[in-house]
Amino acid sequence: MKWQPGEPAPGDMVRVQIGSIFHYGVYVGGDRIVAFGLPPVPAYADAPDRFLVTETDMDVFCTGRIPEIAILDRAERRKRIPPQETVKIARERLGADGYHLIRNNCEHFANECVFGEKKSLQEEAMFRMWNTKPVINVYLGEADRFALDFPVPEARREEIEACSAQSMRNARIANWAILRLAARHSFSLDPDDVVFTRKKHGGWDADRFSFSFSHADGLCCVAVSNAPIGVDFETVEGIARRYDAEKLKKLRARCFTKAEQGAYPDSVEGFLRCWTRKEAIFKQSMKRTFSPAATETRTGAAMTYMLGETPRIVLSLCGEYAGLARFYRTDGNEITPIEAEGPLNL
């Protein structure tokens, strides 16, 4: 497909460039255009039909700019819907809503009318940018603030409902709810459009991004990235409550290498800096079996951060962009950035 200035015929796809983006529509004859949404210019910012499928004259669509007509190649001409049928399809959609800047925009609409297929080169360019620009965001929330009133894969729902311990059930619900928020906030994705699949070892994967779960002491954490990611966290207060100094000493001897025992501070925080790294490395590797003593933590792919004061959280990430993480807290509605100390040196 090529684009060039010219006089459109009914059924042609038309576009105008507005700033760095293009606004697309379908020419329906009589100097009229049907498009999904009005042109993104200040003059129409408050128009009630700004994000509806609307029929306007060419002057409104072009906003003083020169329109370009889609010139189809031979394969596209064979594939396209007949022009008069395209006009009919476009007009049958008048008044439709559901506009989304990335997932359901004017280019999707025009391609659907002409080819019967929702497609947007601008969307594809955005995903290519996401695939090359480092993205690693971490979201924390309280486990008991969420209810299972949103769509989840049936197998995951069965896992959640099978939990006999209420704390574990709350954690699984919260992790999945926060994951849905993260999909929107980090990647502008409708979570219902993301395909989640269960991996062989029982974990879950997504088709558009990588994610990892962790939970401890009534808190839940979800890390998302456009590269494989693993996350784990613990609270200093929680570990200190469950393990005294003697028990931590025994865990160090059993789970840490001699080099690690010398590298990390002999404290609760020091223990957690090593332990959460091991967990994060294991989760990122997607291996079936976790062997703490055989998991080497002194790697540049793993980073550790300290968050908050009450509780004091030790959180580790393993992944290509682990050193570039951004952190957020959410209650299911608001998403608020939080400061983190780190990444910490060994």
Image (cartoon, rainbow, N blue to C red):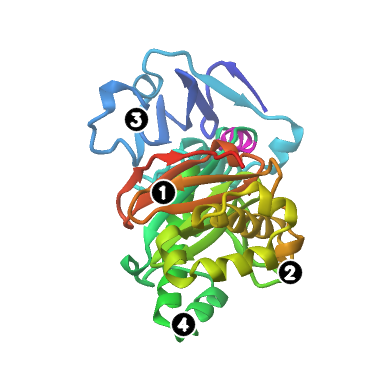
Q: CA distance from mark 1 to mark 4?
A: 43 Å
294 or 159: nearer the viewer: 294
Q: Which residue is mark 1?
A: 92
The range drawn in magenta is 123-131
Q: What is the three-letter code of the residue carrying label 4?
A: Glu
Q: x%, y% of residue 189?
A: 49, 48
Comparing marks 4 and 2, which lies closer to the viewer?
2
Given residues 46 and 154, the one toward you in this image is 154
Q: Position of residue 142 (x, y in %)?
A: 35, 62
Furthest residue toward front: 246
The residue pinned by badge 4 equals: 161
Q: Is residue 138 magenta?
A: no
Residue at 66 percent of width and 47 percent of height: 263
Residue corresponding to mark 3: 56
Q: Secondary structure at mark 2?
A: loop
Q: Nearer the viewer, mark 2 or mark 3?
A: 2
Residue in front for this viewpoint, 278 or 111? 278
